[in-house]
Amino acid sequence: MRTLCLSLTAGLVTLSLTSTLSANDHWPSPVQALVDQGLKIHGEFEAPGGLSGFAASHRGREMAVYLTPDGDHAVVGTLLDAEGNDLSAAPLDEHVRSGQEAKVWQQLEESHWIQDGDPQAERVLYTFTDPNCPYCRKFWQQARPWVEAGEVQLRHVMVGILRNDSPAKAAALLGDQDPAAALQSHSGDGAEIEAAAQPREVEEQVYANNQLFEGLGLMATPTTYYRNDEGRLEKIEGAPGEAALQDAMGGPAP
């Protein structure tokens, strides 16, 4: 006979509640209690053993919630079958990860970036770039073979986080009459961009990029996002090593 077990990680909770749903509650009471504590429910799914499954997240951490058949208990954890297979992974991937990845990609598309390379290139990478970051310059150089061959386009999301003059330098690059040429001069030719006052609209673009950087929980520049061959979102923090570089660019240097 097949059995089911529920693996709980440290810090997760089991709730036992007997209160009934009020007219204003959307979820069963134990699940609603977790929502009230800050969990976000992304979707429901069928689970074995008479359980009801809910795909959730909290502060960017995904988790599965299982409601017992009596409706009075909720357990947060990973559901395993008798062979040790993870039965929570697929629902979380469907309801949480894929949706979060699509949201992040949309946020990157709507951010304020400088085009680097052929805009018709099929492979797109978004990279958070601080004008004072030496590793951003290194990554700019690393990417040249793919960019110059027209295979990859980099979209530099300009942020100002490393030094006091970083926001003004980022704004100067975004506000230049030819941002792509200004970025090439700064990153490739070694001509340091001068911090200069920019229109309020441009300064607000840098601020919005900084907010996105922080909202994604990032810590380092460059941080680069791309879609792999399966269409899933990948992230590289810092200047990549050779293997990671080829993965991001889609193959060896042309």
Image: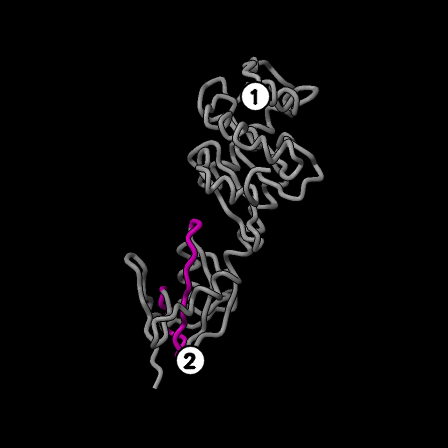
Q: Quadrant of residue 122?
A: top right
Measuring from the top left, give residue 105's x and y in whole percent: 58, 46
Mark 2 Cα-neighbour bin, 10 Å: few <14, some 14–19, many ≥20: few
Other-residue count near label 1 (Cα within 10 Å), few / some / many at <14 / 14–19 / ≥20? some
Write the start and end of the magenta stretch as one range: 59-77
**Which residue lies at the image location 69% right of the left edge and 34% below the top edge?**
118
Image location of residue 154, percent across then percent down: 60, 35
Question: What residue sits right under mark 2 in the picture?
Answer: 50
> Split into 4 quadrants, where in the image is the N terminus?
bottom left
Asked whether disc 1 touches disc 2, contact meaning CB atoms under 8 Å apart, the reply is no
Q: Earlier in the sequence, mark 1 or mark 2?
A: 2
Q: Amino acid at mark 1?
A: Gly
Residue pointed to by mark 1: 188
Depth check: give the residue in front, 139 or 18: 139
User: How is the protein colored in the picture?
Assistant: one colour
Q: Position of residue 22 (x, y in %)?
A: 48, 69
The quarter of the picture where residue 206 lies is: top right
